[in-house]
Amino acid sequence: MIKAAVEPWVEEPLGKFVKDAGVRLALLLLPSGQVMAQYGFTRALDVMSACALAAAIFASSGEMGKLLQGKSFSALHAGGNPQFFLAEAQTARGPYIFLTVFDQESSLGLVRVFYDEFKARLAAAAPPPVSQEPVLASNFEGELNRNLAFLFGRA
Amino acid sequence: MSLVNYQTREITCKIVYYGPGRSGKTTNLHFIYGQVPDDRKGKMVSLATQTDRTLFFDFLPLDLGTISGFTTRFQLYTVPGQVYYQATRKLVLQGADGVVFVADSQARQLQENIESFQDLHQNLSEQDVDPRSVPLVIQYNKQDLPKDLILTTDELSDAVNFRGVPDYSADALHGPGVFETLRGISEIVLKRLSAGATR
C-alpha cells in the first residue's frame, strides 16, 4: 500500500494509518523537507515539492506559534475539500513531520484519532540512529558527469 | 543528511544556494530549470514577493538519473538574500547536504558578500553543524558585467574564499558557470556517500 518508504520500519505504522483513517495522501518527512515515506502520490518529483512546502509551512507556522503563544503549534488543519492535517511526530530518530490530505471519505476527528495511534506506533517502531555504509562506488564521477551533461544538453 | 532508500535504490540530497540579495541565486535555478528536460524535473516553486524577490525560498526538484545503481535526485533550494530574512535562511538551511554560495562580483557588493558568507557560517554553527564539514562551493556570478564594475575571480577569491573551496566564475543569466557549479557541488556531496557518513 505504501508507495515508497525510505526505511522499512515506517511502512507498517503509515500503512495502518492510511487504511484506518481513509485518507487520500500521506507524507512522512524530515524537518529539512526530505521524504521518509509517502502514500498516494504518483510522481517522485511531486513528492519532493510537497515535502519542501510542508516543511516550510510547519517551520514558519512553528515560528509564528512561538511569537504568539511562546511555543510551536502542535498541529495545523486546513478546511475545505480536500482538507489537510500537518503535525509533528517525535521518535528516537528525531522529529518527523506528517502531512495527510483527506476528503469526505474521512474527517478531521478520524484523522486526529488515528494520528495519535500512528504517532505512538511510529515512536515504538523507530530504531536508534545508525552509521551509514558507503553507498556509491568510489568511481561514481563518470556517471555523474554523463548524467549532468545529458540534463544540460551537452551529451 | 542525504537520504538513501535501499529498497527502491534512491538517493535524495538537499542543496541550498546561499548568498547576498540579488546575487543571482534564483537566476541559477531558473537557468537549470530551462535546460533540463521536463521528465527530469518537477515544478519550480517560488515563494516570492510581487516584485519577484525571494520571500521564503525557491525550490527545484531534479532527477539526475542513475549513479552506481541508485536513482539520484537533488532538491535545489535558494534562500532569500536580504539581511532581514535571517530566520527564513536558517529554516531553509536546515538539513542541507551541500551549499552553493553565490557571490555578486560587483565591486560595490564586496562587503555584502563577506557579510553573507559570515552569516552562512553563523547559521550553520547555530544548528550545531560544523561549517567546515558541510560541502561548499563558491560561484562568482555576474562576471559578464563590464570589467570596471566587477572584481576578478582572484580578487573575490582572496576576499571570500578563505576556506579554499572549489570556486567558479559564472554568468547565471546566460548560463556559463551554472552547470560547472552544480557539477562541483554534486561531486562533493556524492563523494560523502561513497565514503560513508553518519545519520
Image (cartoon, rainbow, N blue to C red):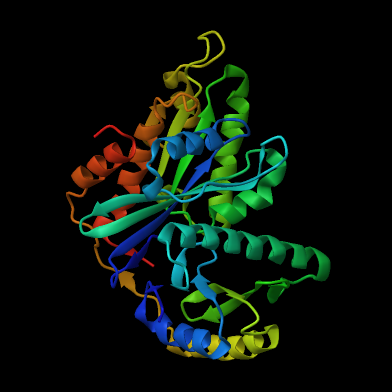
Image location of residue B38, percent across then percent down: 40, 45
Q: Nearer the viewer, residue A51 or B188?
A: A51
Snapshot quadrant of residue B179 = top left
Q: Residue at x 54, y 8 (%)?
A: B148
Extreme residue in the front direction: A104
Q: Is residue B162 visible?
A: no
Q: Residue at x 29, y 69 (%)?
A: B8
Look at the image and tell me in which quarter the C terminus of chain A lies: top left
**Residue A33 falls left or right of residue A102:** left
Q: How many marks?
A: 0
Snapshot quadrant of residue A101 = bottom right
Give the answer, above or below, for where A132 lies relative to A137.
below
Give the answer, above or below, for where B99 lies relative to A4.
above
**Residue A107 falls left or right of residue B106:** right
Q: Nearer the viewer, residue B181 or A82?
A: A82
Q: Residue at x 26, y 44 (%)?
A: A147
Look at the image and tell me in which quarter the N terminus of chain A lies: bottom left
Q: Nearer the viewer, residue B187 or B155?
A: B187
**Residue A73 falls left or right of residue A130:** right
Give the answer, above or below, for where B5 lies relative to A74.
above
Give the answer, above or below, for where B174 lies relative to A29.
above
Extreme residue in the right direction: A68
Image location of residue A49, percent across then percent down: 52, 57
Q: Is residue A91 visible?
A: yes
Image location of residue A144, percent across then percent down: 25, 45
Image location of residue B158, percent across then percent down: 45, 24
